[in-house]
Each structure stands twice: as structure tokens, then as C-alpha cells.
Amino acid sequence: MICHVTLLGGAFGRKSKPDHVAEAAVLSKKVGRPVKVVWTREDDIKFDYYNTVAAMYMKASLDPKGRPTAWLQRSVFPPITSIFDVNAVYGDPGHLQQGWTDVPYAIPNLRVENGPAKAHVRIGWLRSVANIYHGFAVQSFTDELRPPRGSRSG
Amino acid sequence: MIADNTWAAFQGRKSLNVVWDNGPNESYDSDQYKRELQETARTPGSWCGTEGDVDSTFAKGGKTFEADYYVPLLAHAPMEPLVALAELQGWQGHGLGPTQNPQAVQDIVSKRAGHPKGPRDLSRDLARRRVRKKVQA
């Protein structure tokens, strides 16, 4: 079979899955006629390969000037690798690197952790992938640690 | 549901009485799952990077802050839902659609046809035309 690729139109990461085109091919083979497959919007939302759900715990201590002296961050999310191995519960290095082990701050005492989570839905890529939840946690926490305007001493 | 037009497909689907097997994730409850993730996030995990000594610095006291963050599942929700065309006679023919992974389409079809490692008759027409244009330019 020859597979022709059209313009993708968006949903990058979702389109890295071949299911919709394979579905058309298998159906066409079965009915012996050309087939056009169109998913309903409801099916598209309910049966996506979702960008993963994630919980992040952050802890930091500050010196008198408000600068972090120690920083602990722990993220928990069902990994993308769960679509290849149902028993995968820890993030793979590639996705842990996205916004997590690559903390852009010079903090003398820093620890980055990852906890286990079993997947119950299909997890997939969505543009920027793990940066979405990791960036949200790191940057939100940074904002919240910042002293109120006018109260900075150094 | 296969029909001559979308309306007929919708009507045909309404007439089905489907009993779904919800599989091993039938009892999945996203609220309960959220609580489980947050509890795990409050439990020591696997280290993936460390510098200095975090524990002894925290133990010294001073101002410490904690926070929890949560991001739900995100659907891609493209304006155009998934679409594809195919015309096969036997297992030979053409498939067409917006996919980043045409090789995987061929792998699935080859496997269905009983050729797990079938030949990769790959045609990425658009990319080829563009490359050719660039080469000519």
C-alpha cells in the first residue's frame, strides 16, 4: 500500500499516530470500495492520545534576601511510554528533561524527583509535551516565591 | 458505520445497540486519580537530578514554602477531526491522510495482510515535490 501524506493541519503529536489512515485502509479492504473516514468531534475528544495529566510538588527555602537556598521538585505523571508498555510508571529521561531536570536556575541545593503513576487512558505527544506541565509548575512556583512588590531587600 | 453520506452514517449509528466492554480501566475515576497523583507527589520519589544537599538545608529551618500544581489531561482538539481516505483492492492500493507517521500506517496494513515486515512502498508526494522544487530552484 502506498501512503500519501497531506498537509497535517495541526494537532502535531496526535498526527504522529497512524490509526485514522490505517482505519480507512482496513475498511476499504473489507468493503472493496473507496472509503472516507471522518471521526466525529466527540470521538476525537474522547479517544485522543492525551497530553498527560500531572501533579507536581514544589518546596523551597529562601535566604533573608529571598533567594532560594534549597529547592525540591517532584512530578508524577503516567508516562508516554505506557502506550508501548502498560507497566511503565516512571517518566523516561527524554520527557523528564523537558522543563524538569533542566531547571534554569543556579540554586546551590537542588533535587529533582519523579514518582510513579499508572496510565488509564492513552497518553501521547502534544506540542512541547512535558514542558507543558513542568514549565507551569516551575514558573508558577517561581512567581509565588517572589517577594511582594516594594518589599525586596536585595 | 459505513454509509454513502454522513447523515446516513449518523442515522445508522443511532440504530445500533452496542454493548461495550470497557476493559481494565472501567473503574477509572479522574477525581480519584487526581488525588492519588497528588498523594504520590507528596511522597519521596525516584531521584533524577541532584546538586548540593537539599535535606540538610531544609533541616536548618528558615523560610520554606511548599506548593502543589496539577495539570489535567489535554486533548489536541483540532478544528478538523481525524480524517483519511483509502482505496484498496485486496491489500494493495492507496491511503491518504494527515499523518506524521506514514511508515506506521504501512506497518499496520502489512501486518493485517499477513506480512509483518512488508515492503515499505512509501510515497510522501508533497514532501518530494517540495524537495524537487527546491533542488530546481
Image (cartoon, rainbow, N blue to C red):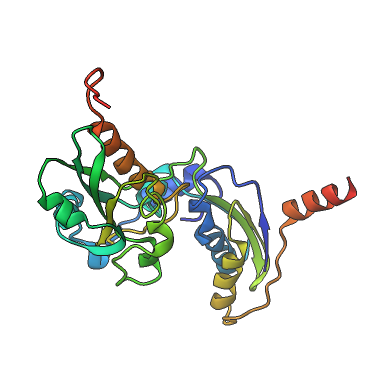
Residue at left offset 35%, top offset 49%? A46
User: Residue furthest toward the top?
Assistant: A150
Residue at left offset 24%, top offset 48%? A71
Identify whether B120 is placed above or below A136. below
For residue A73, side relative to residue A41 (left or right): left
Q: Quadrant of residue A147?
A: top left
Q: Quadrant of residue B21?
A: bottom left
Residue B69 is at least partly visible in this image: yes
Residue A124 picture location, percent across and down? 42, 56
For residue A58, side relative to residue B101 (left or right): left
User: Residue furthest toward the right?
Assistant: B136
For residue A20, side relative to residue B32 (left or right): right
Q: Is residue A88 or residue A91 the one in the foreground?
A: A91
Q: Is residue A63 or residue B103 the one in the foreground?
A: A63
Residue A55 picture location, percent across and down? 24, 50
Residue B74 is at least partly visible in this image: no
Residue A83 picture location, percent across and down? 39, 66
Residue A13 picture location, percent across and down? 49, 52
Identify whether B2 is placed above or below A30. above
Quadrant where the C terminus of chain A lies? top left
- Number of on-image labels: 0
Quadrant where the N terminus of chain A lies? bottom right
